[in-house]
Amino acid sequence: MRRMRVAAVCGAAVATAVGGAVPGAWAVGRPQADLAYHGSADMVAGRVDVRFTPHNHGPGAVPDSMVRIGWSQPLADGQTLPVGCAREGERVVLCRTGALGADDVGERIGLQVRLQGAPSEVLLEFDTVASDGAVAVDEDRVDERQRVLVLDTGDTYYF
């Protein structure tokens, strides 16, 4: 039986990020949204399995967005990612989360990636990318990102 560990998460939620937005700069009439990703990750011999579900804690709806998953280790070349996901450089994968209403839960996203070499750990960083300026950035910007440290033990880390 595998031992399960709970991953420490820096920040309870991920705020939507809007291109060109400046902290504290609010546009009148733009709704706010607070996105978070809840799921699990495990790693064995450089292969990482990540499963998560986007949640919009509101109060506003999100017409469309993507999650940016940053990896502390480079990804191996020649991988097939699920529909709706694409690589953005050596250490980043973008996955479309789609529209999310206020207090809504999106579709589950699952991906398996191989890392270059066989590192003993990888730090995953989840960050939201809004596709347009329709949603305001969380004013306090404290909970913008989620970080999950996954060790190459086969244990499941929850976030």
Image (cartoon, rainbow, N blue to C red):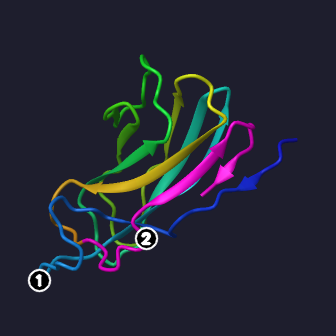
Look at the picture and state if 102 lies above or below 112. below
At 17% from the left and 78% from the top, the residue drawn is 25
The residue tagged 2 is 143
Where in the figure is residue 50, as x and y percent of width and height? Answer: 56, 41
Quadrant of the rendered image containing residue 140:
bottom left
As for residue 123 lying within the magenta part, the answer is no
Q: Quadrant of the N terminus?
A: top right
Amino acid type of the residue tagged 1 in the rendering: Val
Query: What x and y, as percent, mark residue 34?
Result: 37, 71
Q: Are marks 2 and 1 in contact (CB under 8 Å)?
A: no
Looking at the rendering, the stretch of residues picked out in magenta corresponds to: 137-159
Which residue bears the numbered disc 1?
A: 28
Real-space Cα separation, disc 2 to disc 1, in angstroms: 22 Å
Please state, as top left, top right, bottom left or bottom right, where the C terminus lies in the image: bottom right
Disc 2: CA contacts within 10 A as few (<14), some (14-19) or many (>=20): some
Q: Earlier in the sequence, mark 2 or mark 1?
A: 1
Q: Is residue 33 above or below residue 87?
A: below
Single out the mark in the foreground, 2 or 1.
Answer: 2
Residue furthest right as drawn:
1
What count of labels does the image hold? Answer: 2
- Occupied quadrant, residue 60: bottom left
Label 2 is placed on what type of residue? Answer: Asp
Q: Is residue 93 above or below residue 99?
A: above
Kindly identify the residue that appears in the image at 44 percent across and 53 percent down: 126
Residue 23: percent from left, percent from top: 24, 74
Q: Position of residue 88 (x, y in %)?
A: 31, 35
**Magenta span has 149?**
yes
How packed is label 1: few (under 14 Cα within 10 Å), some, or many (20 or more)? few
